[in-house]
Amino acid sequence: MPTLGRSADQLAGVFSRLLHARGAHQNTVEDLGPYFDLPLEQAFPEPPPLRAPSVTRSWVDRAVGSSTLSWRSGHEPLCPKYRRRHYDDYPENLTAWARWVRPAGARRRTALVYVHGWLEPGSWAEESTLFRIWGRELDVDLVHVTLPFHGRRTPRRSLFPGELFWTADLVRSIEGVRQAVFDARSIAGWLRGEGYERVGVTGLSLGGAISMLVGCVTPTPDFVAPMMAHLKLHEAVETAPILWRVKRDLDRWGVGSERREEIFRRLGWSESVPRLAPARQLWVEARDDVYIAPEVVERQWREWGAPPIEWIAGGHMTFPLAVPAITQRLRRFLQELPSGAP
């Protein structure tokens, strides 16, 4: 009999068929050459030092200790054909945004960069729920980074936030991930310059995958805490109900399972290895996750040196039920984190 977690994940997959009413317009599979067989340091180059971002605060922000950060994303696409689209077709996406939440008022020792999941409607979701708990229970300041094509970065042509991020337009999808990693690293570096002694990166679902990639390139953060995530992209596209549109559009263009497997293998992200020791990682995964299959997680977890892992009950969509347990485990992880540079 299906568990509550699996049932909720399957139901969300059904509803996603209403959301993704239209597919990708461009088949860019033949333009993927610049991304194949690249060393990870070339696929994800180190961002230059970030100049002071714009900092704005409303009267509400002052009351809760929050600020809005914005800066020009320095991300540069690899595909020559995509560069025009990047700069001309999606101007909203050229500005990076983040919310800087300092619950204690005074700056704390540790900054935690949080990358949200796919289709996130806005930072208010975490700020009104998860961050209230973490701000109270964890001794950290929080910086919530907006993914490309989400939130204020959503292009006008989009039907909903994140519609253009992960689609069968694989060049745009890959560039979205590259830009997300670039922007997260940019703000992490800026936070280090602001005087934080420790800077870590965490994220949920797609954001968790971004945090894993950040931990695979130098300079590394002090720690990463991916939640409900892995980097085995081919398995996710083939099996996750919520990614049905990606698979259908690629099938429609004649890009079948074998070709998809070759594409993701040559992309190389699935085989990435961390530059951080296992003691500087904390994985949070769900036993009944339909989108992030536990058996795939365990395979990558072993490849990454079997770092500390917290298995929660339930599935992907029932994650909020486990927030108290996750918070307790994350607090212990931060307390036990090795001192010194990673």
Image: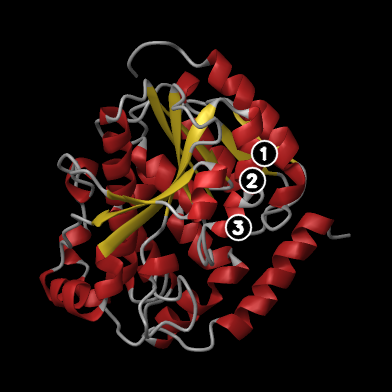
Residue 182 at x, y percent in the picture: 27, 49
- The residue that mark 2 highlights is 130
Relative side of 296 to 316, left or right:
left
The quadrant holding residue 180 is: bottom left
- The disc placed on residue 125 is 3
Amino acid type for the residue under numbered disc 3: Ala
Q: Quadrant of the C terminus?
A: top left
Camera-nearest residue between 291 and 70: 70
Mark 3 or mark 1: name the one nearer the start of the chain.
3
- Decide: is 260 above or below 24: above
Residue placed furthest toward the left: 80
- The disc placed on residue 39 is none
Residue 239 at x, y percent in the picture: 58, 64
Name the residue at 50% across, 16% down. Answer: 337
- Looking at the image, can residue 31 be seen? yes
- Decide: is 33 above or below 59: below
Residue 128 at x, y percent in the picture: 64, 52
